[in-house]
Amino acid sequence: MVFSSPIFLLGFLPIVLLLYYAARGLGRPVSHVVLLASSAVFYGWANPAFLPLLFLSAAVDFACGGFVARTQPGAVANGGELPLCPPGGPRTRSQRAAVFVSVATNLGVLALFKYGGFFADGVARLAGLFGGADTAWAEAFRWTLPLGISFYTFQSMSYTIDVYRGHARATRNALDFACYVSLFPQLVAGPIVRFSEVAEQLRDRRHDVVRFARGVAFFSLGLGKKVLLANPIGELADLCFGAGALGPLEAWLGLVAYAFQIYFDFSGYSDMAVGLGLMLGFVFPKNFDGPYRSASITEFWRRWHVSLSSFLRDYLYLPLGGNRQGRTRTAVNLMVVMGLGGLWHGASWNFVAWGIAHGVLLAIERARGRRALWSALPPPLQVACTFGVVALLWLPFRAPDLASVASYGASLFGAVEPIDGARLVRASLLRPDALMLLLTSALVVWRAPQVWDWTRTLTPARAVASLVVLVVSAALLLTQQFNPFIYFIF
């Protein structure tokens, strides 16, 4: 089930809101049972067989986090709560073992379902180099990818790690923790929420008209990004990427269209997730902060998919040594982290190449004092250069393999003869409606206020505008056939 679907908008969401607010009067446990059941229905809608994996992660991390807290040397429980491990304090071998179990379980599940086929193919190719005849066994490692597994495994195991580090207090309440891991607004595509960010809200959160109205506005504008911008501009991108060899103009317009599509698609989903959270009383962290307005790659990664960037920083980059061990080690750490971040997005060398390329640029900027190679240019040109580089690096995301990356890249730089149908593609891209869509997307990206800021003070005019976007988006949704969520495949 996706947010931008009639069954969600007209069926699931109204029913959940009615049940949730009716249950609030019966106490927190009942309302959390409603949330847990709703999340199970939402996640299991397409394939209920993957629900046990979700709750396996939750059960393992609840047990491991509780064990770490209970066995902290010298800690004393306070008011019925589990002890908070002192940051930097001593840890026992059994505590370290509990963290290992948590990380190994979550990464093991992720590796099995997401990367089993990828690694099996690698082994099969290697065997072929040495005369291996039968590689059909590799098909046994091709599993159907569970929805959102990359997000909920990271979120769940971050709890045990944070308890171990003393950054979060373990909870005794299994129902609260199950709600935290499975909460449907951010379950399948983020933002990745840390337990410390919502622990107090799980115990007691505010419900009022102002917060609910802001949630509706957030959701409406996120749906508008998805339906009014991402979906139609995604069709332009598909037209270009599916056409074959193109001229530079068509190829660049197609790449820019994809850069807009992936931003509106993912940030729109995040806006809808934040909005749904607000309707249920939760405040989730900001996940996008105008990333295409960045003047450097370093700044871009402070603004794009903020919850993943901060996760990789805190749980991978800093443990590797961060920037504390010299310039060379810093560069290696950045490339390792970004390469693994690319692999997190998908089991493909495309994503690894994308991540390492970003890592190289980050390392160069780090060596230059976090200044981009184009930092001497006027600020608007710095932003334009950053967007151009980021858009170029989206190519591995969109192309199915490295050969296709090279082929489309040749079109971008005029290194191939365009096919006969390239003129038809150009005519489609230069239609007034297509140009207006591209222009509107550019204005939203670089000139429109952030949804986070725009909804902070929700005037009557803004409330009406949000509802208009909601109604128009819902009406168009009923007529659109093209409605993928790009990040659902991750």
Image (cartoon, rainbow, N blue to C red):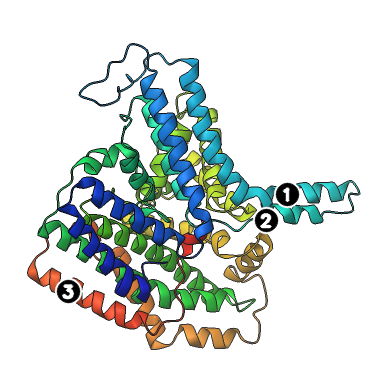
Which of 62 and 153 lies nearest the eye of the viewer?
62
Mark 3 closeness class: few <14, some 14–19, many ≥20 residues within 10 Å: some
| Type of the residue with mark 1 | Ala
| Type of the residue with mark 2 | Arg
Q: Where is residue 258 in the image (x, y as percent from the top left)?
A: 47, 68
Residue annotated with mark 1: 120
Marks 1/3: CA–CA distance? 52 Å
Check disc 1 and report its element: helix, strand or loop. Answer: helix
Residue annotated with mark 3: 465
In the image, residue 2 sits, relative to residue 435, either above or below, namely above
Q: Position of residue 174 (x, y in %)?
A: 35, 39
The residue at the point 32 percent across, 58 percent down is 273
Please report whichever mark, 3 or 2, sits nearer to the chain's N-terminal start: 2
The residue at the point 41 percent across, 82 percent down is 480
Left or right: 282 with respect to 124? left
Q: Position of residue 25 (x, y in %)?
A: 14, 53
In the image, residue 156 sits, relative to residue 284, either above or below, namely above
Mark 2 closeness class: few <14, some 14–19, many ≥20 residues within 10 Å: some
Residue 347 in sight here: yes
